[in-house]
Amino acid sequence: PDRFPTFGKATKTPKPQALDKLAGSIIPHVEVKDMNFRPKALYVAFMTRRVLMCMHDPKLVDDRDYVGNKRLELAGQMLALLFEDLFKEFVRMIKTSMDKILKKPNPTAEFDPINLIGQFESRITGGMERAISTGNWTLKRFRMDRAGVTHVLSRLSYISALGMMTRITSQFEKTRKVSGPRALQPSQFGMLCTSDTPEGEACGLVKNLALMTHITTSDEEEPVRRMVFILGAEDVTTSSGTEVYGAGAYIIFINGTPVALTRQPKQFLVAFRKFRRMGRISEFVSIYINHHHNGVHIATDEGRICRPLIVVEKGKSKVTTRFLESLRKGTMDFDDALSRGIVEYLDVNEENDSNIAVYEDAITQHTTHLEIEPFTILGAVAGLIPYPHHNQSPRNTYQCAMGKQAIGAIAYNQFTRIDTLLYLMVYPQKPMVSTRTIELIKYDKLPAGQNATVAVMSYSGYDIEDALVLNKASCDRGFGRCQVFKKISVPLKGYPNGYSDRMSDRDMENPRHRKIGKDGIVEVGSEIEAGDMYMLKETPMNQSTAVNSAGQKWAPQHMSYKLPDPAYADKVCITTNEGNNTIMKIQTRQTRRPEIGDKFSSRHGQKGVCGLLAEQADMPFSDKGVTPDIIMNPHGFPSRMTVGKMLELVSGKAGVLEGKQEYGTPFGGSKVEDMGNALVRNGFSYTGKDFVTSGITGESLPAYVFFGPIYYQKLKHMVADKMHARSTGPRAILTRQPTEGRSRQGGLRLGEMERDCLIAYGASQLLLERLMLSSDAHEVDVCETCGMMGYNNWCQSCQSSRGVVKMTMPYAAKLLIQELMSMNVKASLQLDDEFPRE
């Protein structure tokens, strides 16, 4: 189908049609003015030349995984596509209905287009709301069908919300095992975080922005094109092929389209950059030279990743002491640095064409730029880790995944919100060993963890395989204590005859109504246990026909609390939704203290569950009388090589003794020598080890123990949410097998692999019991003569009861045979004696 159909116009002859197609549909971004096809021909020739160059030298093939060749689609771009599709559909519908009305020979009313617009205007709003709420972008015009474009922002912790806002998802399908797109690209340096990516199937496909990254929006090409000609470049369309590809001639491309020609590419580049630093051109326009195919590339399009760098001229950084002082005073800010040409944004391609010094003392006469700070190559989530440059890299990646699951403070309004699920720590603390990133993203204001005194030693044997021993007295004082808030939401529906659901009065005699107030809703502050009513709702029996209030009957629909562990009613909120229906929201609260099986983690990917709650009297204590909050098994260190954790302990200990905040900033931070000296000044060993006495025997331990504060996070995986067992319980209706899942009191599945093990052991009776007797044993009547199933000792197909016997088989097998029969497939049962005579 033609993209631009002609209505009622005279059809053109084939030659103009072909010219139109060439001008408008083939390589449409190179525009044709006044039927001048030369720019388009030049573009095609250039494409052909690139292909031939690649045939000659395979190294010149572009790398599709190189970050400079990628563009990010932002929310605005996606919404623009969606709006364009909906708006054109809207216009088309108005046009068709107008045609319909105006075609009538004798209209009954005066034609008013406003009514038509009113009919269809909800389509745009509805279409956008539907796309955003489901995440499905389905655009017929662009043949685009993409799912999962939008996500609900996770508010599990402050970091999980922050990490979600910097996330980048590639459209590459996760199932294929290709290493190319998943690999860590060298061009990712400073643009995308090198550590923050999920483990498992999405590894390397889901990335996160680094700390100072900016994503460009599109700038106009026309002013840039004029600027190119002002800077003395000649028009490429007027020159011949020998001039274009002659020695020393460089083509200037704007967003990939050849525009002009220059013979002094370096001078042109320097002049263009000077204009950009003066602010004559947008700061996000990038320019770089490609010497392989003699081109100067200028990019103004949207979705390029770029980051700021300090400009270096004549071997000196443009950031002066005076500028830094005015920054500190607040008389200048980052935008002033940008407009004065002290700082400029470089995208990946231009960064590759520059010579960047990491530190100021590394500047030579060839240096063009200076890094603002090396730690900005990491993102906001990886920036929480102290001393990450001393850890093995996968450990930092694990911490990036776990930092988003830590329980802490989520926002300053956390007590006024009613979330579906909210985990809050009761006493969150800011870390003793901070980083610069933590201060920049304000994690120290909304922390998720506590500084625990840790002893690295083996104790009790309940600390095997990363398990932790917790001090019971610390838990009594509030270590690791958290609150779980859940929302129960009940709408009061309205019905066509004007009635709506209502609350009914409590029954004083009924013990399950004890917790309910006189308005029919649970009283705030009362403890609800399993089986207690929390809301007495009634629905009208007559919902469609009009009846007077005396004739209306009401059916009770009381809501009862189902969960096994009790909770407190924390808040009750009565509100309405868009449809003006009343909604009752009840927030329940549980306070949980750490128990055996709860998951904890330090900031170095060292996760473990609590294996024992030991009495304080039995814990070892140091010569200062300090008992640890956590005892960690030393086997967690050698193979994992998380030296950053040891440095955090030493720095934290020195910081406690000196009363200072220490830093573990990536590629910097407090130095170990200084920390060791601080420990020695305060009468401790510079190694961070202490003399420890056993709390059980009272004897001193024969070794010094590594002892000091480490920041520990409590993770959202708690044993109270996962513990599950079942004897008998609910069954699925169709197959009569036990239901699945903890929420439905499901059975514990003996899967195919477990079945294989039992077969290998030859445990046939156990197999029979697990797969049939404990699951869906069913007694059926089977006819021995025809092999069909009967009922009541009668075979319907033989019309007799002579050969009918009873046997037990799984109900699912009986169902399968009957479903096959419904498809005209006869499956007959051939019977044998269970215990034959011979």
Image (tube, rainbow, N blue to C red):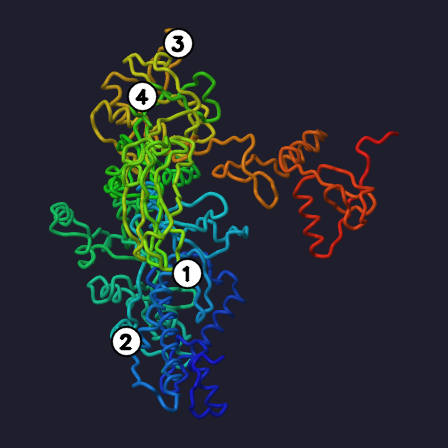
Contact flag, marks 4 and 3 (Cβ < 8 Å) = no
Separation (CA) of disc 4 from disc 1 = 56 Å
Query: Between 198 and 572, which is closer to the camera in this rendering?
Result: 572
Separation (CA) of disc 1 from disc 2 = 26 Å
**Residue 229's mark?**
2
Residue type at mark 2 is Phe
Q: Earlier in the sequence, mark 4 or mark 1?
A: 1
Residue visible at 46% across and 91% down? 12
Locate residue 32, reporting x and y percent.
38, 82
Residue visible at 30% across and 48% down? 211
Judging by the rendered image, the residue that carries numbered circle 3 is 696
Quadrant of the rendered structure where residue 738 is? Answer: top right
Q: Earlier in the sequence, mark 1 or mark 2?
A: 1
Separation (CA) of disc 3 from disc 2 = 86 Å
Q: Earlier in the sequence, mark 3 or mark 2?
A: 2
- Numbered disc in front, either 3 or 2: 3
Judging by the rendered image, the residue that carries numbered circle 1 is 69
- Numbered disc in front, either 1 or 2: 1
The quarter of the rendered structure image containing the C terminus is top right
Could you say whether the residue bearing mark 4 is in a helix, strand or loop? helix
In this rendering, position of residue 324 left or right of residue 723: left
Judging by the rendered image, the residue that carries numbered circle 4 is 476
Contact flag, marks 4 and 1 (Cβ < 8 Å) = no
Contact flag, marks 3 and 2 (Cβ < 8 Å) = no
Quadrant of the rendered structure where residue 696 is? Answer: top left
Could you say whether the residue bearing mark 2 is in a helix, strand or loop? helix
Q: Residue furthest front?
A: 550
**Is residue 584 in view?**
yes
Residue type at mark 4 is Asp
Contact flag, marks 1 and 2 (Cβ < 8 Å) = no
